[in-house]
Amino acid sequence: MTIKKLLIANRGEIASRIIKSAHQMGIGTVAIYTDPDANSPYVREAKEAFKLDSSYLDAKKIIEIASNANVDAIHPGYGFLSENSNFANLVSKSNIKWVGPSANAIKKMGDKLTAKKLSEKASVPTLPMTSDPKEAKKIGYPLLIKAAAGGGGKGMRIVKSQKDLKESIASAQREAEGGFGDKRVFIERYIAKSRHIEIQILGDSYGNIVHLGERECSIQRRHQKVVEESPSPVVDEELRNEMGAAAIKIASLLKYESAGTVEFLFDEKTKEFWFLEVNTRLQVEHPVTEEVTGIDLVREQLKIANGDPLDFSQEEIEWFGSSIEVRLYSEDPGNNFLPVTGKLIAFEPTENPLVRWDTGVETGSEITPNFDPMLAKVISYGENRVEAANKLALALENSHFGGLKTNRDYLISILRSDEFLQGNTTTDFLEKAKIKDEINLSEKEIYFLAIAASMWIQGKNRFESEVLSNLSSGWNNARLPMQEVKLQYKDKPLTVKYNNNREEIFTTDNNNLAKINSWDKNFIDIEIDNVRIRSKITCEDDLLLIQSKSGDVLFKILPKFETVKKVSIDGGLNAPMPGKVVEVKIKKGAKIKKGDTLVILEAMKMEHKVLAPSDGKVKEILIHKDEQVENGATLVVLD
Amino acid sequence: MPKLESQPFESKLDTSGEQFNKNKISMLSMLEEIDVLLDEAELGGGEHHKERLSKRGKLPVRERVFHFLDPDSPFLEISGLAAYKSDYPVGGGAIAGIGVSAGIECIIFANDPTVLAGAMHFYSVKKWMRAMQIARDSRLPFIQFVESAGGDLRPRSNAVVGGTTHFAESGRQFYEITELSKLNIPTVTVTFGTATAGGAYQPGMSDYNIFVKDQADVALAGPPLVQMATGEISSREDIGGAKMHAEKSGLAEYLADNDLDGIRIAREVMSHLNWEKEGTKPRFSIEEPLHNQDDLLGLIEPSLKTPFDIREIIGRIADGSKFEEFKPLFGPTIICGFISIHGYPVGVLGNNGMLFPNASQKAAHFIQLCNKRNLPLVFLQNITGFMVGKDYEQDGSIKKGAQMLNAVSNSEVPHLTIIVGNSYGAGTYAMSGREFGNSFTFLWPTAKIAVMGGEVIAGVMSIVRRGQAIRKGIKFDEKKDTEIVKDQQIGHDKASVALKATSVLSDDGIIDPRDTRDVLGICLSVVNNKKVQGSKSFGVFRL
């Protein structure tokens, strides 16, 4: 039997990604979705789609949908049920092909402790670890707490000293329990200046296993990867072969089928590497391997699931050039990378330069707290690493997207930093390289963009006018004040005043001359003094997003007339993001010290502590456990 | 969108000649003088008054108007140079103009509190009356920004009566506001400051009242007069405070926090007016004229002695310069034809010389025709009058001229009149002067308006004096007479200039010739707030 119809038990960009390869192979696709995803692109891209009333973790229901839709195979993507051996089992028992490794391999590797034993059996070195908190001292600080069932940084904590150990373990357990339904954690030695290097493997059902080289994913924030690349700047052919052989050895012991990743920690100084874990799924960062090898990993997975043998041997695999992937998130790097929710008012990836955008969002997408706030993976390919980095930075700069805070400027800063270009990408890169979350524009350049934005608004006002609309902008025979547009950039108000003249040249209150070459609903081409600005513009309600040479700038349009001001409560502590209250650590009237944890919020599956800003007393608690709170909601009032 | 099928007018204007340049220099210097006067008008009662206002958190009158208007929308000020060379600052202590607020064309009249605390006098009352007339004629919502100390009671002023000669003739303003309301023309008043005694009826008679907190002071009589009349001691707030009127008397519908808030509320009111224009939108696709409008600066020689082809103006105000001339071979001293301006089809009449009898007939015929087609009429005046002399009187100069005057008087489509040069005697009337019921009159800086030219008047008077001398048998002093003639000519010419006319609000203002097309475009849109309907009481007489 060959696969004719595939259900993707996933959502977002990876669902779109899998649909693309499946359709290329002539395989029909079935998408599943929950309410928040009703308008997601992947639902439309799939040939058929079914609504899931529960969640993407509801194995039984998903299999029921698959059976009713007569699918031949299920691809789990990454996350959700992708590394759930029970699900893999259920799928196989339902006579549906499972696109992934065997349930047994998943189960074994799902437990990091078992995985470590396997590695030892394969004579691949591992880091010292323990499951007993009492032995933490033996491992030595700083150390790392990891969830046995972990992945994606959930349940992971770096502990710098003994005093934080207890709380860190408790919180890691809580997160692990919430994320994986398994609260087991263990303690491992933490190596600060290391590199995270992983080997992509492929195995078929005939015992053939090959590796597709490495990916380096050392640049991480909150234990989640931000930049991934292949090849690694520190891996040469010899090391690649060595690590590849180690990975194949481990995989062979598992009789590994499908795509998988063997993760290692690499110490650049000693050239040592330690086995970390095996990811028994397609990785988020798989595209960089595809770019340098020319092998479509999803296609290979589907072929393997179909029972086809690999049609290339290790010797036939070749690597060309360099590929870098960045993960574009709606998050605030300046605020501890906290997720940001809201509406993506524009999402228009550039075609100049053309890079690969694996994305599950589009213009108008709402970024909700329900799912991971990743907007897209942007992947470049270049002849060499520097070219790939520059091209990727350029693509990020030339694209038009935003409306809510993203990490674009931050990613561009990484890609354009000397540290990155020189390949100094150890795991402490982000602290060391002092990456700034700032757009590379001068104050004057921001002001010119404000003028361009004002001129666009002016054009919109004229375009939308229904009477006297053919008269030139601001026509009058009187003495009237200059027209004005009040904008806000970040927290700073920025007012542009202007007059139009007989030659349709606008003069600002700073004597800049602006001449509009063309205007339309999403674009302006304007000369300000002698600077030509050609920008896509998206305006929605009071937000105006305008392209600059370094990416988009978001202005808030301030109202002409001030309306009633919102009164904020003195001493009130507000929620930094929307989320669920998982714990209230204080009682009314309690005395608190600066830095005390008052409330723990969970948003996007991550915990966030609300700390006391100063010493004081709790006057009032306005929320309770398990309550869902809005961004900015007052949680606690302090005296 | 359809277009006028006619061909563009071919310009013969020599824009590189010496005369053109001289004319242009002269026109620009007149415009410069006007610019200076507009700056002066903007100052109102002076900078120090504005500072005093701003200290009390109040906005200058022009900012009030500006914030009320939709951003980037046009604003046509009416009679900006009223009270020029009068006892009052130029501008007349009030602003009137047509603008767009919340997407609705409307007319705004605003007191300038920096001029005599907004006290009303001949010029401001006339401006106010004119604003209400425009509201009535063109069916425009009427907005008042009130802050006025009342009538200018100083002895020399005839303010109470607003240009009339006795108090008994006064008060028509208040009647007019009420009339507007009856005609379904909304009247919206924002009271920013004092409005007492008669002034209290300004908000008193409006459909909507917005009072600014702690600033509006509206009472029939202030505390001193009350004390005089009844002996009662009271405070200003008790008697006329904004809050009192919002809570107790119910005179104010809306209580605003400050000037800007009052304007915001006024815009809210505008947005609920459920206003629809009865007339049409632009019917034709709008094309810029082929010929440069800047050329209008050099068209006219300032003494007005050198004739020019009025079609050079038509070709610069018409969409695509397209002009379909009506009866070009008959009565050629009046040019008639069809054009469109900013997409509005109109009939246009312009003078290329004196009104000869058959020119009058042609005009009468054309006006009647445009009434049947419901086409507004644009009059471009450069007229020294009807042709006089034996032959012409015998040809029926009066009778045929009367046909034209009759047609103009009884025409019911809107008339827009631009006086570009001469405007003399009965010619002024025949070409739809202000008193012949036009909708708008605008002047070019070169306009001269009088019963006849100064030279002619002075000459006529000289002939009369000479005749008297002969009859009485006294010696005629030639030398003295020459001096009198010269003085009279200068005097009359001075009195006839555009600035003098506009000072007493006998028109709607002086415009830059380059703005002619846009001003007409605005006016055409404005008059279309009311359905444009020609007279139904006659057919087209083929005169």
Image (cartoon, coloured by chain):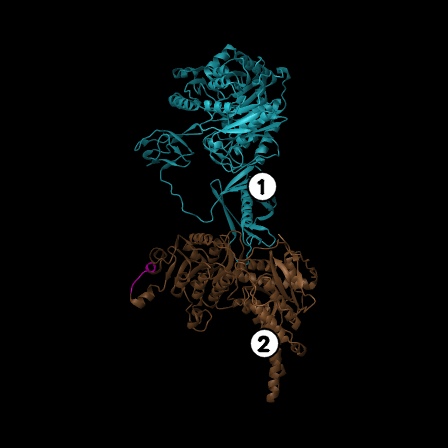
Chain colours: A cyan, B brown
Q: Is residue A560 left or right of residue B342?
A: left
Picture layout, residue A357 above or below residue B121: above
Q: Choose top left, top right, bottom left or bottom right for residue A589.
A: top left
Picture layout, residue A73 above or below residue B523: above
Callout 2 crowding tier (Cα within 10 Å): few <14, some 14–19, many ≥20? many
Q: Choose top left, top right, bottom left or bottom right for residue B262.
A: bottom left
Q: Are marks 2 and 1 in contact (CB under 8 Å)?
A: no
The subunit letter for the residue under badge 1 reads: A
In reply to whether residue B8 is colored magenta, the answer given is no
Q: Position of residue A344 (x, y in %)?
A: 51, 36
Amino acid of disc 2: Gln
In reply to whether residue B235 is colored magenta, the answer given is yes
Picture layout, residue A395 above or below residue B91: above
Q: Is residue A97 left or right of residue A155?
A: right
Callout 1 crowding tier (Cα within 10 Å): few <14, some 14–19, many ≥20? many
Q: Choose top left, top right, bottom left or bottom right for residue A169.
A: top left
Q: Position of residue A209 (x, y in %)?
A: 58, 14
User: Any mark on residue A512, and which?
Assistant: none
Residue at label 2? B488
Give SS at disc 1: strand
Q: Can residue B114 be seen in the rendering of this structure?
A: no
User: From the viewer's perspective, is the residue at label 2 or at label 1 nearer?
Assistant: 1
Amino acid of disc 1: Ser
Give SS at disc 2: helix
The subunit letter for the residue under badge 2 reads: B
User: Any mark on residue A535, and which?
Assistant: 1
Q: Which residues are magenta?
A: B232-238
The outermost residue toward the bottom is B473
Q: Can residue A39 be seen in the rendering of this structure?
A: yes
